[in-house]
Image (tube, helix red, strand yellow):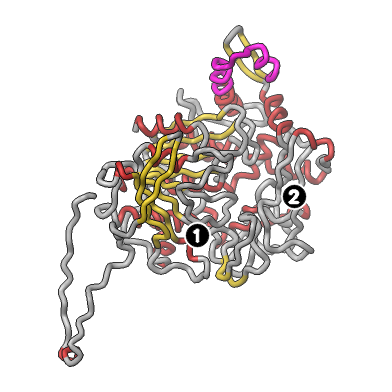
């Protein structure tokens, strides 16, 4: 345990209290970590038993939101016995957010979704302090009744919504502030906090790293009683981050709009229709190549909207001012014109080359991916449109719009629409294009929504003058992940690199929308830091 200052509280009492001879004991400061408040346990990781100390259900907010489900603003802390007296051990901060839904703190013995050893157990085995914070999400309400499916809020829930944007990132920032505030009392080093998340959790991990100490979040943090400490972190691990939501639709249609014959339709009706209103999940269930013949093709209005959204992307890319490592500006041009397609292709080629080099069946590999262009053992290029068609063959593309879909061409509520509702309204449009095309809206996109959308995008904060962006980044997006356009993660990587941050970015070969894979590679990256 680290050395720390002991603060002596004076015992004072008034004359009127003398009669009872009662002296109030000194009160513990709010949000103070109790080094003795632990239980012990053992887990086995790859055949090796790991003894640990556990502090569970620790409140990281002194003034939590009003709800009967208190776990959303609590955390679990696990320390391997080997690191209990180590003040330098890294801290893995693993959020369990998916689909921007609320999440409870995870327990150290919880396996990954695939049933394998997860990143928390692996980190504990390597001597790291492991922290799992709960966080509010888009369906959080004051009255909560647990259901069987975490992506299906129960009908019995009620009361105001308390988890709309930017609640999730505010909670994660508060968790970091708790760790920093108690750094002298806790094992591990709060100067080595490494955040990890997947999908929406990956976006929040990126935002946590991107927007460290930014003052725009201060009113929200004060409202929940966050500890008076910094909230910047040392490193970010982000798998398939669903971020940059205000530009996600134009990015998706610019990338995939040429493949507009088949799209997976949303299964949720708009609010006000039977089954609509309080959304359940993203409204875009997974499909597979086997069932695409049963899916409807794009109609003319959908094709027109796809083209309209795609035309917005080049100007947005130009506004970012991104440059390749050789200094050449990245421009989207029109369709396959410009430098951007070649830049995107380079990431796919690099990933394919690594996979080919390690393949034991080189001829089978070449036959499986005919859109790759080989020069003997080297991959010299690819047919980009055929590659995108291959991605679509593995899983149907999303409907148009893919994200801000509520009321657009009679589109259903998306999970992202649900993120930007209010205390009284479940879901709202969050882009100007979506707002204008939903016939129930009037005027322009309200300033409150614009402000909250801004606070949910790491791209808005990287390298800002009033922000302490994390110096180290590990970002992965699967080559067959179509849940968001991989232009989103490429842009995130490129902006970070252009501003001098250390970034390990890769399109992971044949990986779908998933996370916490290749853990040996992840921890080797951390070890280098």
| Above or below, comparing residue 55 to residue 192 in the picture | below
> Within 10 angstroms of label 1, few (less than 14), some, or many (20 or more) residues?
many
The percent coordinates of residue 79 (x first, y second) are 35, 47
| Above or below, comparing residue 386 to residue 413 in the picture | above
Q: Was residue 359 drawn as part of the magenta stretch in this picture?
A: yes
| Above or below, comparing residue 500 to residue 167 in the picture | above
The percent coordinates of residue 383 (x first, y second) are 68, 21
- Secondary structure at badge 1 equals helix
The percent coordinates of residue 350 (x first, y second) are 54, 21
> Where does label 2 land, which residue?
266
Q: Quadrant of the C terminus?
A: top left
- Number of labels in the image equals 2
Rendered image quadrant of residue 143: bottom right
- The numbered dot on residue 167 is 1
Side of 241 relative to 417 (left or right)? left
Rendered image quadrant of residue 462: top left
> Within 10 angstroms of label 2, few (less than 14), some, or many (20 or more) residues?
some
Q: How far apart are the alpha carbons under marks 1 and 2?
A: 26 Å
The percent coordinates of residue 369 (x first, y second) are 68, 20
Q: Was residue 464 drawn as part of the magenta stretch in this picture?
A: no
Q: Write the residue at 16% across / 67% down.
A: 8
> Is most of the magenta stretch helix, strand or loop?
helix
Q: Which one is in front, 508 or 379?
A: 508
Q: Which one is in front, 128 or 162?
A: 128
Q: Who comes first in sequence, dot 1 or dot 2?
A: 1
Q: Write the residue at 41% across / 47% down.
A: 93
Q: Which stretch did the figure color magenta?
A: 350-371
Rendered image quadrant of residue 419: bottom right
Side of 359 relative to 36 (left or right)? right
Whether pointer 1 and pointer 2 mark residues with C-beta atoms closer than 8 Å, the reply is no
């Amino acid at each position: 345990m680290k050395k720390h200052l002991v603060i002596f509280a004076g015992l004072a009492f008034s004359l009127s209290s003398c009669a009872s001879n009662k002296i109030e004991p000194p009160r513990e400061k709010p949000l103070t970590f109790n080094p003795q408040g632990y239980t012990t346990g053992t887990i086995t990781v790859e055949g090796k038993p790991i003894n640990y100390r556990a502090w569970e259900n620790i409140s990281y907010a002194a003034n939590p939101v009003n709800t009967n489900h208190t776990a959303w603003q609590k955390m679990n802390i696990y320390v391997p016995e080997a690191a209990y007296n180590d003040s330098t051990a890294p801290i893995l901060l693993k959020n369990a957010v998916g689909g921007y839904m609320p999440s409870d703190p995870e327990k150290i013995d919880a396996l990954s979704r695939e049933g394998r050893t997860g990143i928390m157990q692996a980190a504990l085995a390597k001597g790291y302090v492991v922290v799992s914070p709960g966080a509010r999400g888009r369906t959080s309400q004051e009255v909560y009744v647990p259901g069987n499916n975490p992506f299906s809020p129960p009908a019995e829930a009620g009361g105001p919504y308390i988890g709309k944007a930017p609640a999730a990132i505010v909670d994660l920032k508060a968790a970091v502030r708790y760790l920093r505030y108690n750094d002298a009392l806790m094992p591990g080093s709060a100067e080595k906090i490494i955040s990890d998340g997947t999908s929406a959790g990956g976006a929040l991990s990126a935002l946590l790293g991107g927007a460290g100490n930014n003052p725009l979040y201060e009113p929200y943090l004060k409202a929940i009683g966050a500890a008076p400490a910094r909230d910047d972190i040392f490193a970010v691990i982000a798998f398939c981050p669903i971020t940059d939501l205000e530009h996600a639709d134009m990015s998706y249609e610019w990338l995939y709009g040429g493949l507009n014959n088949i799209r997976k339709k949303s299964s949720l009706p708009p609010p006000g229709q039977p089954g609509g209103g309080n959304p359940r999940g993203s409204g875009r269930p997974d499909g597979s190549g086997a069932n695409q013949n049963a899916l409807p093709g794009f109609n003319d209005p959908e094709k027109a909207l796809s083209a309209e959204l795609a035309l917005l992307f080049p100007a947005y890319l130009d506004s970012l001012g991104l440059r390749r490592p050789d200094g050449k500006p990245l421009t989207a041009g029109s369709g396959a014109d410009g430098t951007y397609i070649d830049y995107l292709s380079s990431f796919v080629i690099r990933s394919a080359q690594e996979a080919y080099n390690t393949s034991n069946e080189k001829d089978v590999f070449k036959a499986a991916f005919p859109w790759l262009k080989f020069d003997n053992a080297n991959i010299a290029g690819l047919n980009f449109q055929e590659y995108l068609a291959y991605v679509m063959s593995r899983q149907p593309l999303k409907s148009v719009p893919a994200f801000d879909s509520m009321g657009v061409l009679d589109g259903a509520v998306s999970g992202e629409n649900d993120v930007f509702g209010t205390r009284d309204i479940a879901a709202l449009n969050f882009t100007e294009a979506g707002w204008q095309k939903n016939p129930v809206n009037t005027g322009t996109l309200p300033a409150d929504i614009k402000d909250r959308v801004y606070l949910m995008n790491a791209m808005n904060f990287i390298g800002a003058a009033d922000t302490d962006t994390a110096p180290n980044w590990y970002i992965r997006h699967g080559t067959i992940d179509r849940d968001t356009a991989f232009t989103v993660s490429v842009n995130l990587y490129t902006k970070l690199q252009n501003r001098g941050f250390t970034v390990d970015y890769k399109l992971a070969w044949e990986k779908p929308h998933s996370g916490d894979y290749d853990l040996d590679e992840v921890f080797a990256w951390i070890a280098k830091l």
